[in-house]
Amino acid sequence: MRFRLLLRRLFTGAISMCMLVLQDVPATSAEPELPFLQVGKDYHIGFPKDRSPFVYSTSGITESYEKRPDGTKANRRPAQWSMNVTLDIFHVTQLSAGSWILVEHPASPKDYALWVGKHRAALRLTNADNLDAESLAISKTYASKEIRTTQTWINLDHAVTIKPVSKESLNMTTQ
C-alpha cells in the first residue's frame, strides 16, 4: 500500500512538473499578463523547492585527513558529500499570452554556478570606479565568459518569487 501511494505521489509530481515547462505555449499575438517583466532583462524566478525544474544534484566521495598537533596529516576514512544547486536566474527573451515566458539559461546544469558568477561580475562592473585593477580584471574575465545556453518556455503561475537581478538579490550589498 505504501509503495502504491509513493508511486502515485511521484507520478503526480512528475505530471505537474511537465505541465510547468512543457504545456502548449499560447500564441505570442495575445496580450501578456505580466507587464512588470521586460524582454532582455534578467530575473530571479523562484519555484517551490520540491517543484523546481532547474535543480542539479550531485554527490561524491573525497579523501579526508586529520591534522595532528605536530602539523602532519593522517589519512581518515573517505568522506561523502552531496550538493543541490537550484538555478533561479533567467534571461527573459520573449513574453507570450497569459503567464508564459521564454527564458534563456545554461544548457548544462554543471554551468549553473558559472552563470551566477557571470551575473555577479557584470553587476560588479556597473560600479567599476570602486574596483582596484586586479578586481576589475577578474570581473571583466568572468563577465565575458561564454556559456552555452538554451531556451525554455515556463509558466509563471507556478513561480513563488519574481524579482529583477540586483546587487541586493545576489547578496552583494557590501561589494
Image: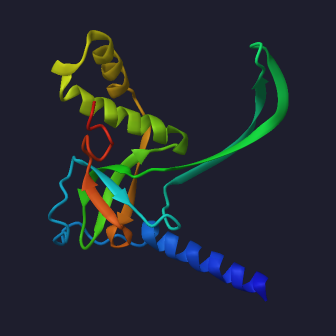
> Where residue 89 sits: x, y (%)?
36, 49
Report whether 21 appears left or right of 76: left
Locate residue 96: give its quadrant.
bottom left
- Where residue 97 appears, x then y in whole percent? 24, 71
In the image, residue 83 lies at what x, y percent?
A: 61, 46
Instruction: Please identify the quarter of the rendering in which residue 3 is found.
Output: bottom right
User: Above or below — where is 142 with respect to 151?
Assistant: above
Of 15 and 63, nearer the camera is: 63
Q: Quadrant of the C terminus?
A: top left
Quarter of the image for residue 59 reads top right
Looking at this rendering, what residue extends furthest in the front direction? 69
Q: Residue at x 30, y 20 (%)?
A: 140
Where does the image place residue 115, in percent across and percent down from the top left?
41, 38
Q: Is residue 162 left or right of residue 146?
A: left
* Residue drawn at (77%, 13%) of the image: 70
Toward the viewer: 65 or 118?
65
Q: How many marks?
A: 0
Q: Is residue 91 above or below residue 127?
A: below
